Image (cartoon, rainbow, N blue to C red):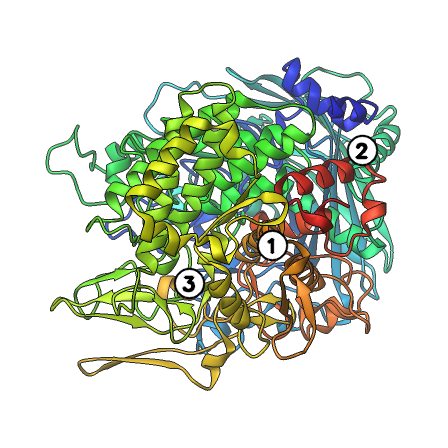
Amino acid sequence: MAEQKFIDVTEQKRLNDAREAGIPWKKWGPYLSERQWGTVREDYSEDGNAWDYFTHDQSRSRAYRWGEDGLGGISDDKQRLCFALALWNERDPILKERLFGLTNSEANHGEDVKEYYFYIDSTPTHSYMKYLYKYPQREFPYRDLIETNRGRSREEFEYELLDTGVFDDDRYFDVFVEYAKEGPEDVLIRVTVHNRGPEAARLRLLPTLWFRNTWSWGGDDPKPSLREVAPGAMQASHHELGEYWLYCDGAPELLFTENETNTQRLWGQPNASPYVKDAFHACLIAGQGEAVNPAKAGTKATAHYLLDVPAGGSQTVRLRLAATPMDNAFNGFEKVFTSRIGDADEFYQRITPKSLSEDERRVHRQALAGMLWSKQFYYFDLEQWLLEHKSHPLLQADPHNVRNMEWFHMLNADVISMPDKWEYPWYAAWDLAFHTTALALVDFDFAKEQLLLMLRNLYFHPNGQIPAYEWNFSDVNPPVHAWATLYLYKMERTLGRADLRFLERSFQGLMLNFNWWVNRKDPAGRNVFAGGFLGLDNIGVFDRSAQLPTGGSLEQADGTAWMAFYCQCMLEMALILTEYDPMYEEIAFKFIQHFMWISYAMDRIGENKDEMWDEEDGFFYDLLRLPDGQAMRLKVRSLVGLLPLCASTVFEGDYLKRYPKMAEMINMFRKRHPDLVNHVAPTDEGFIGHKDRRLLSILNKKKLTRVLGYMLDENEFLGPHGIRSLSRHHLEHPFLFQVDHEEFKVQYLPGESNTGMFGGNSNWRGPVWMPVNALIIRALLNLYGFYGDKFTVECPTGSGRQMTLFEVAQEISCRLAGTFLRDADGRRPVYGGTAKFQDDPHWRDLILFYEYFHGDNGAGLGASHQTGWTGLVALLLDVFGRLDAKAMLETERGRTTARLFREQVGGEQGGK
């Protein structure tokens, strides 16, 4: 097995031990949220306004029901015991215990974190992790950020923390926190505080240990305890977790309280206990020493360090959290850190192609570190939540109408990869699928577990729907789970471990989900699909999840293309399973048949006004069906019309010989529907391709050439940093649609959204989005595997430069990666005109992986830590990007990637 060649890598041994021997190397990790307040889980309001029901101001005083948040923290994998930092610069009005940001109503472009923090490093078992928080020495400008942003229009830039001047003269602390595991339940913690300012400055550092509150909600959970057992040492006791000890170097003062709500402060009601959640704030900032428990016991405790840090200097604090008591907790402390950092370097050295430059390696490693730091324990018992809302549809009379009532079966209590642990501290189904393809570079087991999680009966709806996200589990995300499943299976197979059990378990659940799509999202039975916004928020003329202002219905080119893509992935999976169980051969044909009808529905024989393909324009559009029976195309050139390109899959030439029963069924279908087959897959246009391969694609060669003409035009879709979500043509030629006296307009907007559609915090009308670009690259590689080097297109359109589809894919990948890399002037496009990030040596090599990117200059936009799907840049760098093919073969993972690339793509270039 190829995997055995990694056996000498220490971190890989830990991964193997976790999988094969059940050693809990992943029991402790970065599983705290970065924002628990303002979430649906914590919302018990009458009107469903989660942001206003539980605010940032309340969070320091109010116990959470469903989870915990913290600054650079960790927890066990059920988030029973938590550790994080609290800070005070002796100027702020509150302790810095969690990240601050604006709610949707406070900001001019939707909710947004207003802090600077960075995920610098992590191994997949979290045996080593490093995090950085930049803490101003001046008073944090909470009010200024709220009032200035609230006063700005959607046409203006956001007002950022750097804009306030709070970092002027470098008067801030760099607070690094590092974790190193001596064993699975023995975590060493090192906090290093650097004063970047011109004068000495004081910092109160409060490393905090606490229990998630599971005892205040009317159940029978016994209350855990923390108590001081020696100077600078505390013991934690929990009925499930057992005993843990936290050792604090230097024997600082230990403060204790309860993780319980301060009802007196919030609502003027007497507290159940004199010691409440915000006691450390009261003790240090308000000088109320009686707020902490003199008995040195409770459910929340902190070590109080007073650090005077010289100008340009640093101070370090050491702690250790372990499941066994120790006589000398700090013996060999630095040696353990040196060893774990060495393990991390060894691991990344082994998986990173040697041809990457120093800067590319930095981007690659920080992208993967960000993905690993974005894990979070997500707890949501919908049945209990609905009962508490008096809204259970089966168990309560006259239930109130609240969100997610139809998901009462759900019980989520797992570590899950989040899109962004502050802006989106909840899983999103289609985001998660993309996450797994990049996570597989470092941890196959976790990646596969994430995909299977969504198909488990405690997540998956009995009707076959995959949950979308907590704001509305019944919303519809693009069906990309099958693609991610297939990708992970194939990639792992190249390592010598074909996990058929994973493939089959996934396939069974995906069959139910596929049938849900067919039955629910094609109501007229015409093989054209709707689905609402489908993850593309404001891309449409109208809100595609709402009732149309025209009446009638919308047939979506992207929804239909997604289903064609779904068919292809399910077909491939069925054929793999057929090798082990012949019953899957007939199921495989089902997906061929589905694909043929879907593809035909998008462009039927002849000139038809009621189909998505526009022969005159050479592009796909959404189709509006009006109540009077008329139909019209909404001629917006957007990703909606490019997504049919993604439904392209190539099969080896001998596949019909290997599956004779399916070949027989295909021949029967061809005889019954010859015109349809010739229209969708005409043999005279190259149905048999390079090395006798077969192509299954919505686009024949003629359509492909026309669509690529738009996609590769720099005045249309091809931007300097990837494929735009909307054609730049619409900057000067906006699409206008009149309904009665209301005008709807779609105009190219390369930056932030100027509308409130879907909250206004994302924009699909111009910016570059990494996940869809990745699927386009995958399609180009597949099509290259069919057409080979003989088929070339002009790239960029109008340049006179001909490229193979492999070279086109490589060009797009380089543009995407270039977003994060230093250009010829030493600047990173992702940071736009922000001088601090471009020039300051303490900022310029810290990479943020934003949600999406400016369509013309690549500046990062939206959620600043959405490493989840933007972390796909690591995968692109691995596959080709700036790689030299020969150097790629010098690493084991590089050889693995090359084998996978050959298997999926083939062709002359892929065979090198």
Precedes in sequence: disc 2 or disc 3? 2
Is residue 615 shown above or below 798?
A: above
**In this picture, residue 572 sits left or right of residue 95:** left
The structure residue drawn at horizontal position 32% and vertical position 42%, both measured from the top left corner, is 671
| Residue denoted by label 3 | 640
Precedes in sequence: disc 1 or disc 2? 2
Residue 119 visible within the image: no
| Residue denoted by label 2 | 250
Task: Judge the density around disc 1: few (<14), some (14-19), many (≥20) Cα neighbours within 10 Å.
Answer: many
Q: Amino acid at mark 3?
A: Val
Between residues 640 and 837, which one lies in front from this camera angle?
A: 640
Q: Amino acid at mark 1?
A: Tyr
Front tag of 1 and 3: 1
**In this picture, residue 875 sits left or right of residue 464:** right
| Measured Cα–Cα span from mark 1 to mark 3 | 24 Å
The structure residue drawn at horizontal position 39% and vertical position 31%, both measured from the top left corner, is 664
Task: Judge the density around disc 3: few (<14), some (14-19), many (≥20) Cα neighbours within 10 Å.
Answer: many
Q: Quadrant of the N terminus?
A: top right
- Image quarter of residue 540: bottom left
Between residues 51 and 729, which one lies in front from this camera angle?
A: 729
Precedes in sequence: disc 1 or disc 3? 3
| Residue denoted by label 1 | 787
Percent across and percent down for residue 466 are 37, 38
